[in-house]
Image: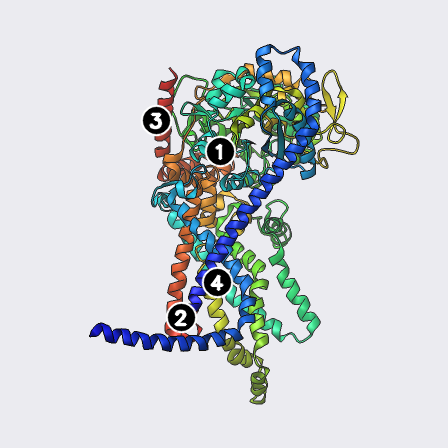
Amino acid sequence: MNGLTARNNGMSGWEKRMASNIQKLKKIKQFIPLYLMMLPGVLYLIINNYIPMAGIIVAFKQFNYTKGIWGSEFIGFKNFEFLFKSPDSWLITRNTICYNFAFIVIGTIGAIAVAVLLDEIKLPFAKKVYQTIILVPFLISIVIVSYIVYGFLSTETGFINNCILKALGKEPVSWYSSPRYWPFILMIVHEWKWIGYNCILYYATIVGIDKGYYEAAVIDGANRLQKIKYITLPALRPTVIILTLMSIGNIFRSDFGLFYQVPMNSGPLIDVTNTIDTYVYRGLMENSTLGMSSAAGLYQSFVGFVLVLGANLLVRKFDDENALF
Amino acid sequence: MRKSKKMLSLFLVFVMILSMLTGCSKESNESNKRNDSNETNVSEESDASKESDETRQDEISNQQNDLSDELSKQEPYVVKIAMVGDAATDDCNAVAEAASKITEEKFNTTIELVRFGYGSYMEELNLMLASGEKLDLFTAFRLSVTAGANAGQIIALDELLENYGQDILADIPKEDWKCTSLNGSIYGVRNNKELASGYGIAMVTEILETLETDITEIKSEEDLTALFREVKEKYPNVYPIVTDRGTMEWYNAYLDPLGGDFGVLEDCTTDSSEVVNWFDSETYKELVNVRHSWVTEGLMMPDPSTNSENATDLLAAGKGFSFISNTKPGIDGELERQIGKNITVLEITPPFSLTESLSNMWYIPPNSQSPDRAMQVLNEIYSNPELTNILINGLEGTHFEVVDEEKGIIDYPEGVDASNTGYSMAAWAWPNELISYTWTMDDPNVWTDTIAFNKSAINSKGKGFMWDSTAVLSEVAACTNVKAKYFNSINTGELDPEEAIPKFVEELKRAGVDTIIAEKQRQFDEWLDSQE
């Protein structure tokens, strides 16, 4: 008896679904050109990002080239040990997170400030010139950046010691062996390099704000600062949330070039420049084992993944509209 | 919705299959092409090879005759060789073609040669090895026997050497094989070059000649102080001693690092088999105390550990007088070419030989479809000067010119030099530089001197020991990071050893250096027992 009704229900449900599916198909047809446009991007993601993900398994194996990825011996979490066993584990985790956190906060504030200022410039030519100038550092290789920094900080021939400190009548500083200055130096170098790139998205959002709002505000007697405060900044909110969420996903990764090349791998600075990436590089350079470096990468990605989920959860709680998913 | 999901999964499967198919088809296409080109080559060359075979037959005994006859009638095969050093692809192909003429006649084998710059070699090689790409022979460059064999990147050569490497076996002495073997199997064929290293100091001759200090009296780094003082007095604008990009890694001491990663023989010429922490040893303390005194007296360049320039550049620019250098036959000439000034190298520590002294060698990877053929070619490169000369120096007329036929001296052709040649020289990385030509800038006797140098070297007690770090990799990673913090600043004398060394040693201990040393001691004792 029960079975019969169930079957009947099933039949009718199936028919209903067919009908709705046909409707959906018709809708999809409409969007076929859009799907086609999406295809190259999706293909790229699948081939480049999803298929290689199977390689995660290397992190749990004693990788042997002859036996291959699947044939190598499974050793569980042994490859991860070196990240936690060291007395420096806490230090490198702290450095990585603190630097990245500071980069996110200061970077966002700086990028928004630059974007707002750019928008205030009315002369189109000047606007282009400024934008280009700010973007140039982003295009310079980090190795070259490290030598530009060296040009400033070299004890003997550097600009700061020779032109600024000397003129002020102060003693020259041996920058590459004074760790206390480096959190600031790294911060400045990082901002100098990235601010032009980071402000592009904010600037694009600002350009996209309906000019009607500003005109209305002018009629109401708002000055420049008030326009920025009540129109520009609230309009930027969704962009800020999305970009911040995305950078939180990378909070366990550090810009290797910035932390290794820019301090010139100087020993006395290691306590303030050692991050997870530089630790792994230094530790495994001589004894390259694929398993251990994969383990480090997986650890960083996993923590980043969890943090993104957590941050998104928070955003959803307070500002449901702007959550990523 | 469900339908679109199904569509997506179907699509995924399709993409995967497609990518797999394209991967396969490419490979088979390539191998087909290779076979084709081989066959045409063979038919073209076979006449020539028959003729020259006949002229040689008189000299060779019948038995060998059969063997070489047999080898020249093998199936055609391409041996792909990976080698370090910059070279243009066209030049590599041209050199490989010239070399193939010899190997084709003998083994019906052609050579394919790829070269990568020093910076990218290991990366490219790892990619080739991991992807299973065809590769038959490669030169070891920062890949040790232990690491390579444990990771399955190289294969054991014993049988291959027995069958096809008789010339190599006859030339390399028994104790040298130990340095390239693991668990009783041979994995590498060591290059025939200088197999030991001495240490000393390289100085600008021009300045040295105006000094009164007697350098023949110098027997240790401490004795250098008087010399440096005189330099400082007479040439106040010249730093008496400089560092090489912030490092001063070489010591005038009989140190055997026993494969690296902490744990050393403090003096490898004595009979002691105790593995110690070098940074906690008396010898190290004495050495860096002297260097620290150079810093406090102003004899060392300022900020020695953050100097970003090469020692050779500093000497060339007239800023520096000397640096701690390794010594070997022809080192003066080598440095003079880099610096552009006359250089005097004074040997303070006579040459001694370690396992690491033999770290330039050749391997056969599991990627080789026919290791037999790889070994035949390797044996030929090792023993045939004609073939080795082509591979090391390139093509006559294009990459070099013979200056003195009798003595075998060559030079660059007009308009070509080290900076613009399409085929850079890296003789030391090839299996046997000692049978190749010498260059005009080298001492013509450099190869005979090298043989004498190798003979005169003291063998370390630890020579032949192979360190396997697998069990303590976590500790090694932690200790290496600690070392990065202190190594250069203590080594160059920048930090006061009295304060810095105890801190350094303490941090190493916390990072587990004792575990590494204990493990190394265990392996070393085991190895020593097996030697008796």
Q: Nearer the viewer, residue B2 or A311?
A: B2
Q: Both on one chain, marks 3 and 2? A: no
Can residue A89 be seen here?
Answer: yes
**Left or right: residue B99 compared with residue B248:** right
Q: How many marks?
A: 4
Q: Amino acid at mark 2?
A: Val
Q: Which residue is mark 4?
A: A104
Q: Chain of mark 4?
A: A
Question: Could you say which is closer to the camera, residue A285 or residue A46?
Answer: A46
Q: Residue B250 in the image: x percent, y percent?
A: 53, 29
Residues at marks 1 and 4 on the same chain: no
Disc 1 from disc 4: Cα separation? 47 Å
State how far apart marks 1 and 2 are (Cα): 53 Å
Q: Residues within 10 Å of mark 2 (few under 14, many from 20)?
A: some
Quadrant for the C terminus of chain B, please: top left
Q: From this viewpoint, which residue is outermost toward the bottom? A: A219
Q: Secondary structure at mark 1?
A: loop
What mark, if any, has residue A315 been given in the picture? Answer: 2
Q: Is residue A169 above or below residue B113?
A: below
Chain assignment, label 3: B
Name the amino acid, label 1: Pro
Q: Nearer the viewer, residue B123 or A212?
A: B123
Which of labels 3 and 1 is toward the front? 1
Q: The residue tagged with tag 3: helix, strand or loop?
A: helix
Q: Percent from the top left, x then y, of residue B366?
A: 49, 33
Disc 3 to disc 2, C-alpha distance: 56 Å
Residue displayed at 56% across by 60% down: A194
Q: Residues within 10 Å of mark 1 (few under 14, many from 20)?
A: many
Question: How far, Cα to Cα, is label 4 from label 2?
Answer: 16 Å
